[in-house]
Image: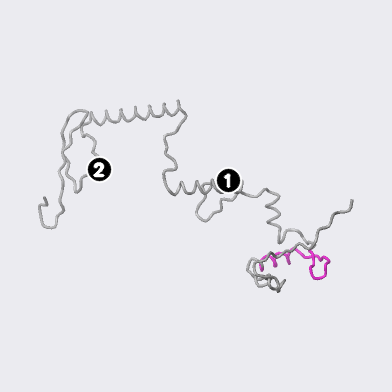
Amino acid sequence: MPQSYLESRRYRVTYQCERCGKSFRRVYASVPAKDPACPRAECVAAAATADMQRQIDNLQMMLLTGETPAHVGGNTQVRAIDETAKIVMQDYSLTDLKDNVREGEAVAPKLPPAQQQAADNYFGGAASRKVPDFMTGGSGTVSSRQMQQIGRRALAGAYRGMAVTQKMIAPNMPEGAPPLTLVRTERGAK
C-alpha cells in the first residue's frame, strides 16, 4: 500500500530462478509483463551461453533449409500494398513495378529510353518541327521555342475552354448516343 498521501501503489514481486533456484525480490510501480533475469553472475553467464547456442542452432537450421525466420506480410498495410501491386500487375500485365517507394512517388515502371526521349521532347527538343494546320489543311513549321511556350500554356490550363461537346458537333443527336455513326462500308479495289 502507499506509504504517504497521494503516493502510487507499489508492488513487491518475488521471483525464483529456474536455473539455480535462487529467490529474489523486486519492487515495481506496476507489475511487469516480462520476468527479469536472475542477478547471480553464474546464471547471467549461463543465460548468455544458452542464448548464443540458440542463435547458432537457428542459423544452422536456416542454412540447411534455406528459409529465413522473418515473418513478412503480417502487417495489414503491407498486405494491402502487396495485394494492390499484384492486382495492377495482373490487370495491366506489368511485371516491373518499382517497390520500396515513398509516399507520393509513382510505382509505374520507367519508359524505355526511346519513349522517354520522345515524351521529353514532345513540346521541344528539335530546332523546328512541321505541324499540321487544321484550318488550311496544309502544314507549317513551328520553332522549338514556340512549342515550349505552347507546352507551358497547356500545362497551365490555357486550352481548357477549347474543348467541344457532343451537342456542339451534332445538336440533333440524342443524349447518350455514340458520337460516331457508320454511314457505309466499301470494299477495297483488287
- Quadrant of residue 122 in the image? bottom right
Taking 84 as reference, is 158 left or right? right
Q: Is residue 137 magenta?
A: yes
Q: Is residue 81 above or below residue 45?
A: below
Residue at 16%, 44% (x, y): give it. 27
Residue at 18%, 46% (x, y): give it. 28
Instruction: Please tell me whether mark 2 sits on a helix, a strand or a loop.
Output: loop
Which disc, if any, is residue 33? 2
Taking 21 as reference, is 139 left or right? right
Q: How is the image coloured?
A: one colour
Along the viewing direction, whichever of 132 and 45 lies nearer the viewer: 132
Q: Position of residue 132 (x, y in %)?
A: 79, 64
Q: Position of residue 121 (x, y in %)?
A: 71, 57
Residue at 54%, 54% (x, y): give it. 105
Instruction: Please tell me whether mark 1 sits on a helix, a strand or a loop.
Output: helix
Along the viewing direction, whichever of 44 and 64 lies nearer the viewer: 64
Q: Which residues are magenta?
A: 131-153
Q: Is residue 62 above or below residue 130?
A: above
Q: Amino acid at mark 1?
A: Gln
Question: Around disc 1, counting alpha carbons within 10 Å, would you say few (fewer than 14), some (14 to 19), or many (20 or more)?
Answer: few
Q: Is residue 82 magenta?
A: no
Q: Position of residue 188 (x, y in %)?
A: 86, 54
Q: Position of residue 164 (x, y in %)?
A: 69, 71
- Quadrant of residue 48 in the image? top left
Along the viewing direction, whichever of 189 and 60 lies nearer the viewer: 189
Q: Which residue is mark 1?
A: 90
Taking 73 as reference, is 178 left or right? right
Q: Is residue 34 above or below residue 137?
A: above
Q: Between marks 2 and 1, how big is the CA–CA gap?
A: 46 Å
Q: Is residue 91 above or below residue 60?
A: below
Between tags 2 and 1, which lies in front?
1
